Image (cartoon, grey):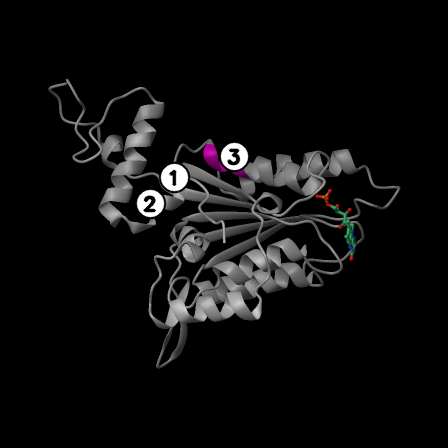
Amino acid sequence: MRLRLNTTLNRQNKTDNQRRNLVMYETSQSSKTAVCPRFGLCYGELRTPHPTERTPMKKLLYIDSCVLRETSNTRKIADAVVANLQQTGEYVTEQLVLEKLDLRPFTSETLAHRNQLRHAENYDDAMFDLAHQFAEADVIVVAAPFWDGSYPALLKVYLEHISVTGIVNRYTDHGPVGQCRGQKLYYVTTRGGLATDEQDLGWQNIKALCHVYGIDQAECISVNGTDIPTTNVEQAVADAIASIPERIGR
Ligand SMILES: Cc1cc2nc3c(=O)[nH]c(=O)nc-3n(C[C@H](O)[C@H](O)[C@H](O)COP(=O)(O)O)c2cc1C
């Protein structure tokens, strides 16, 4: 499988401290401050580092399962959610455009391979990169148009890849316990018709999975009626975007 996505994902073999320092280093690089990746000290300056230089940024994971990307209303709204979260200055963002990942549904062969690795507790394999990335995200934004009562199959395939017991959850004597770091997941969707959030099996599924993964809060941001001729779609999308700062508590 080709899941080595970028340098961020290649950090999985590092310790938490090394990862934190990498994030801090990149953050300071982008703001043109040279900070030692190991100790967090500013090169060439005899001063105590500002507290923000020591604070690791939180991780925002943007999972985009939209297709027809140029025109996707779902993507427009989800982009705005991500932009609003980024404006808080609290996050480093990693974006996955699922249609570009070449993810495949599991087959007898690939599932057997995954089970073998899992039973050996060999979670360093590249096959688990996406699961680690998901488990380590502080906030997650999912963009998914409403398709056939649910979400696109691409997203289902992604979810099968990240749902790895031992990474996103574990089994105890009292049943499964989620072990994702994330506290909040935003699910953004637009629907051609008038199905409610309750009738949207995609959203209901995501909500249930959040419980399994240990993500406490899940929120659906939806716009309906995009394929109904009388709907002013542009206005409906603009209204949804305007409501985002309040919805994310800014
Ligand atoms: C393959 C496919 C399946 C769809 N299934 C439904 C459906 O079951 N119910 C519905 O109300 N709209 C359905 N729609 C319409 C989409 O939900 C609607 O156009 C949505 O706004 C598309 O989002 P997008 O602009 O982000 O692509 C479907 C559209 C596609 C392409």
**Position of residue 244 measured from the top left corner of the image (x, y, whole percent):** 58, 39
Q: Amino acid at mark 2?
A: Arg
Query: Between residues 122 and 21, which one lies in front from this camera angle?
Result: 122
- Is residue 136 in the magenta section? no
Asked if the residue at tag 1 contacts the one at tag 2, i.e. Cβ–Cβ closer than 8 Å, the answer is: yes
**Position of residue 7 measured from the top left corner of the image (x, y, whole percent):** 38, 39
- Counting labels gives 3
Q: Amino acid at mark 3?
A: Asn
Q: Earlier in the sequence, mark 2 or mark 3?
A: 2
Cα–Cα gap, marks 3 and 1: 25 Å
Location of mark 2 (residue)? 11
**Position of residue 212 measured from the top left corner of the image (x, y, whole percent):** 47, 67
Q: Outermost residue, bottom direction?
A: 173
Q: Residue at x 54, y 62 (%)?
A: 160
SS at mark 1?
Answer: loop
Query: Between residues 56 and 3, which one lies in front from this camera angle?
Result: 3
Q: Amino acid at mark 1?
A: Thr
Specify the label residue 7 is tagged with: 1
Location of mark 3 (residue)? 84
Q: Residue at x 48, y 57 (%)?
A: 217
Q: Which residues are magenta?
A: 82-86
